[in-house]
Image (cartoon, helix red, strand yellow):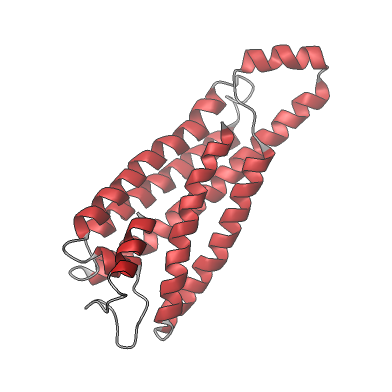
């Protein structure tokens, strides 16, 4: 979605859309998506992204943990999984909603949905990283408490894929960058004078979120 809209905006010669303020030269993602001929693409791509990403996260949080009998009774992991899933469902619903209720015709509702979507995805990712860290710590504790032969039989019994430290570390790094960018984006939008800087940051936020989605391929 990000790349398609960016290409469209660049190929169009960086036009000034009616939803942009005076002096703004960098369009927001929503400015491009609100155009009548781009809106169907905006909706379909956002919906595809949401409907693809949500099952991946649910499988990551629930299926793998439920296959490990030693983790099933962990109330902390269940709470983290539940809240993370609720947040990502909220973020996905708001993402789809803000593409339908575009910036040009539903200004206030659009920004309200945007304000719910971004934190929803971000905090869902934070809780997912905490969840994986606890699984990784549990995994290492088990490795330290068992001999090599016992560990092999234990892994076969658990059937739960191990947490990969590199994948977890990469996601933490991506979310850290996202936190900085989201903070700057909020500050620039709140000031109502740094729209061009906010526009650049928003494109970066969406692009890095795509990298975060792609990071789940590192688990396989």
Q: Is residue 147 above or below residue 204?
A: above
Between 34 and 190, the one nearer to me in the picture: 34
Residue 56's spot in the image, x, y percent?
44, 36
Res 167 quadrant in image: top right
Residue 125's spot in the image, x, y percent?
52, 48
Residue 116's spot in the image, x, y percent?
38, 59
Quadrant position of the C terminus in the picture: top right
Quadrant position of the N terminus in the picture: bottom left
Res 158 quadrant in image: top right
| Relative horizontal placement of residue 33, taking residue 146 as reference (left or right) | left
Q: Residue at x 44, y 75 (%)?
A: 198
Q: Residue at x 58, y 61 (%)?
A: 177
Residue 17's spot in the image, x, y percent?
24, 76
Between 122 and 152, the one nearer to me in the picture: 152
Quick check: can you spot residue 98?
yes
| Relative horizontal placement of residue 17, taking residue 51 as reference (left or right) | left
Quick check: can you spot residue 111?
no
Q: Is residue 19 above or below residue 112?
A: below
Q: Is residue 53 above or below residue 20?
A: above
């Amino acid at each position: 979605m990000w790349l398609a809209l960016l290409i469209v905006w660049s190929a169009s010669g960086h036009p000034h859309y009616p939803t942009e303020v005076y002096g703004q030269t960098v369009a927001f993602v929503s400015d491009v998506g609100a155009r009548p001929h781009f809106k169907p693409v905006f909706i379909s791509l956002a919906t595809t992204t949401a409907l693809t990403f949500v099952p991946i996260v649910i499988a990551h949080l629930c299926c793998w943990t439920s296959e490990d009998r030693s983790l099933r009774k962990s109330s902390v992991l269940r709470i983290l999984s539940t809240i993370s899933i609720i947040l990502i469902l909220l973020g996905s619903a708001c993402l789809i909603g803000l593409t339908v209720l575009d910036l040009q015709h539903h200004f206030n509702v659009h920004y309200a949905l945007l304000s719910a979507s971004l934190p929803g995805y971000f905090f869902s990712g934070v809780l997912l990283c905490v969840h994986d860290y606890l699984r990784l710590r549990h995994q290492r504790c088990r490795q330290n408490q068992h001999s090599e032969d016992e560990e092999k039989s234990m892994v076969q019994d658990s059937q739960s894929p191990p947490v990969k430290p590199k994948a977890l570390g990469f996601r933490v790094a991506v979310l850290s960058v996202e936190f900085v960018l989201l903070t700057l984006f909020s500050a620039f939008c709140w000031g109502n004078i740094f729209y061009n800087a906010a526009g650049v940051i928003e494109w970066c936020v969406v692009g890095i979120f795509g990298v975060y989605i792609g990071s789940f391929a590192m688990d396989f």
